[in-house]
Image: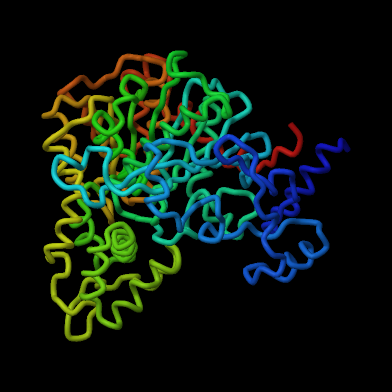
């Protein structure tokens, strides 16, 4: 057996227990393009480690789990805005090479991967027309960049994750990294990575909540996405990317919370990041929560009511005045529920909120008022992050591709048509796919092959079926039927062929590639 194969087998065996070999990348990262020593592996008596993990770590055979982001100086979670005042949005503060967790269908051993800490801004202190300006509170953003073996280096896919958490332990950058205790949380993203890598695209996944883990802050996440792209351009020599003059282009995709960030980035791009004009080929996404208040009323009482709890926690992280107001409105019972979202992740607060009326008022509810969403301060923040309102005043000038289920338990189905109509009035180029397949989560999978095809066509410069101000709107029994469009048929494609090319078969995903 070849030595390389033995190492890969050993890595997989250790990976079953969430472990990894100690590598040279464990002990340093790059800060300002210079080598900077950081503490070695976290203490081997880490209370988060299991006994078997502690045993092997104590023997020096494996590294202990990586520290949580709030304990990792790379993330800069405790950094003050004043410390960043001499930096511009998109400036790279530091970067480090990392390893990505492998899963069936994702052989991460052959990927080059980096984490980038960069400067971004949110909308705190901004109102009205200033929302599109580069002011606001300065903070640190994090992005994970992955380079496949056959990368073309002129195409970057910014993939906005479906992270529904208001605590730094829930960050995608943490769960994606090999050797973390929360490795299975990355499955919601790593499942969709292989087809992008097969295309030769470099993939960037930004942590959408920013330094303050502001889940639900569409404006802030949209800015962060754009700044992560600017940071990649500045770090292109390290990553190996071509320059803008050499044809470097970006495409974007996100679903659910990722779609919120994606389309807010589209909404903001021309004014917030004009240097990206002519270098973005398209924005794609599905399950878009355009109006958070309407989504909250749809979610309340159902099995996904916890998303309201998570978003309230995230907006509390984003806006100090919102946090003060919500704290004054919550009862003792309400604090017990909503604090779960501030301290833990998606599964915990979703389970605690399952089927409940999480907006109920007195005498025995979670709030001391009957309609907490009608409070003026709460309303102002919901309006700020209402993409339907923003779309009425400005429309992106880059092609858009939006999908959604007509039977979605989380998103009112009329929202996708409303935002499409508003953008079309602003002369946007948009394709809308309405899927009759029920389920918010299921639509992410049924819409995915069509999304990959659409992004491929935009990268390849093919003619778009939609035209400025003339959207293409189709209702399909199943999102996979979007692959039967005239454009796909002209290429000799069919549902099955396109699906097999874009989404690997289950057998391929479960067959480990032990030796390349």
Q: Is residue 353 above or below residue 26?
A: below
Residue at the image position 27 percent from the left and 51 percent from the top:
408
Q: Quadrant of residue 112?
A: top right
Q: Is residue 318 visible?
A: yes
Q: Is residue 314 above or below residue 456?
A: below
375 or 464: nearer the viewer: 375
Coordinates of residue 217 in the picture (x, y in percent): 29, 51
Determine whether, in the image, residue 49 is placed left or right of residue 329.
Answer: right
Coordinates of residue 450 in the picture (x, y in percent): 38, 31
Coordinates of residue 57 in the picture (x, y in percent): 76, 62
Q: In the picture, which quadrant includes the N terminus?
A: top right
Q: Is residue 103 visible?
A: no
Q: Is residue 218 above or below residue 469?
A: below
Residue at the image position 35 percent from the left and 25 percent from the top:
280
Residue at the image position 61 percent from the left and 56 percent from the top:
180
Q: Quadrant of residue 262?
A: top left
Determine whether, in the image, residue 78 is placed left or right of residue 220.
Answer: right
Residue at the image position 52 percent from the left and 44 percent from the top:
191
299 or 62: nearer the viewer: 62
Q: In the picture, which quadrant includes the C terminus?
A: top right
Determine whether, in the image, residue 271 is placed left or right of residue 310.
Answer: left
Coordinates of residue 412 in the picture (x, y in percent): 21, 51
């Amino acid at each position: 057996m070849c030595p390389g194969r033995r190492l890969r087998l050993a890595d997989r065996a250790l990976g079953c227990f969430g472990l990894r070999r100690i590598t040279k990348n464990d002990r340093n990262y790059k800060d300002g393009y210079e080598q900077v020593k950081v503490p070695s592996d976290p203490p081997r008596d880490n209370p988060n480690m299991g006994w078997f993990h502690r045993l092997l770590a104590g023997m020096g055979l494996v590294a202990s789990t990586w520290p949580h982001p709030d304990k990792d100086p790379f993330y800069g979670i405790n950094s003050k805005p004043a410390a960043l005042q001499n930096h511009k949005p998109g400036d790279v503060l530091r970067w480090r090479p990392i390893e990505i967790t492998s899963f069936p269908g994702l052989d991460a051993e052959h990927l080059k991967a980096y984490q980038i800490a960069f400067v971004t801004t949110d909308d705190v202190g901004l109102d009205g027309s200033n929302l599109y300006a580069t002011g606001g509170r300065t903070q640190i953003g994090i992005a994970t960049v992955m380079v496949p073996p056959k990368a073309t280096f002129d195409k970057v896919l910014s993939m906005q994750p479906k992270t529904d958490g208001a605590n730094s332990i829930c960050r995608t950058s943490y769960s994606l990294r090999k050797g973390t205790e929360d490795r299975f949380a990355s499955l919601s993203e790593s499942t969709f990575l292989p087809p992008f890598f097969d295309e030769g695209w470099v993939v960037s996944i930004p942590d959408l909540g920013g330094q303050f883990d502001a889940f639900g802050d569409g404006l802030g996440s949209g800015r962060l996405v754009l700044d992560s792209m600017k940071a990649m351009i500045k770090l292109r020599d390290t990553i190996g990317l071509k320059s803008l003059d050499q044809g470097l282009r970006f495409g974007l995709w996100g679903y659910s919370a990722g779609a919120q960030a994606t389309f807010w980035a589209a909404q903001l791009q021309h004014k917030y990041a004009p240097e990206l004009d002519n270098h973005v080929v398209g924005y794609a996404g599905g399950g878009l929560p355009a109006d958070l208040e309407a989504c909250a009323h749809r979610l309340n009482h159902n099995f996904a009511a916890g998303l309201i709890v998570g978003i309230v926690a995230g907006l509390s992280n984003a806006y100090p005045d919102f946090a003060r107001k919500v704290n004054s409105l919550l009862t003792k019972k309400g604090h017990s529920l909503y604090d779960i979202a501030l301290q833990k992740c998606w599964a915990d607060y979703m389970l605690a909120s399952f089927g409940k009326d999480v907006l109920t008022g007195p005498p025995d509810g979670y709030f001391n008022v009957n309609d907490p969403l009608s409070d003026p301060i709460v309303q102002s923040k919901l309006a700020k992050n209402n993409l339907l309102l923003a779309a009425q005043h400005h429309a992106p000038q880059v092609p858009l591709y939006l999908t959604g289920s007509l039977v979605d338990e989380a998103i009112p189905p009329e929202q996708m048509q409303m935002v499409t109509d508003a953008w079309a009035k602003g002369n946007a180029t948009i394709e809308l796919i309405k899927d009759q397949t029920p389920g918010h989560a299921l639509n992410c999978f049924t819409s995915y092959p069509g999304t990959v095809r659409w992004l491929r066509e935009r990268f390849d410069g093919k003619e778009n079926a939609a035209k400025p101000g003339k959207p293409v709107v189709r209702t399909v029994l199943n999102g996979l039927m979007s692959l039967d469009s005239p454009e796909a048929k002209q290429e000799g494609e069919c549902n099955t062929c396109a699906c097999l090319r874009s989404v690997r078969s289950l057998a391929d995903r479960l067959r480990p590639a032990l030796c390349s």
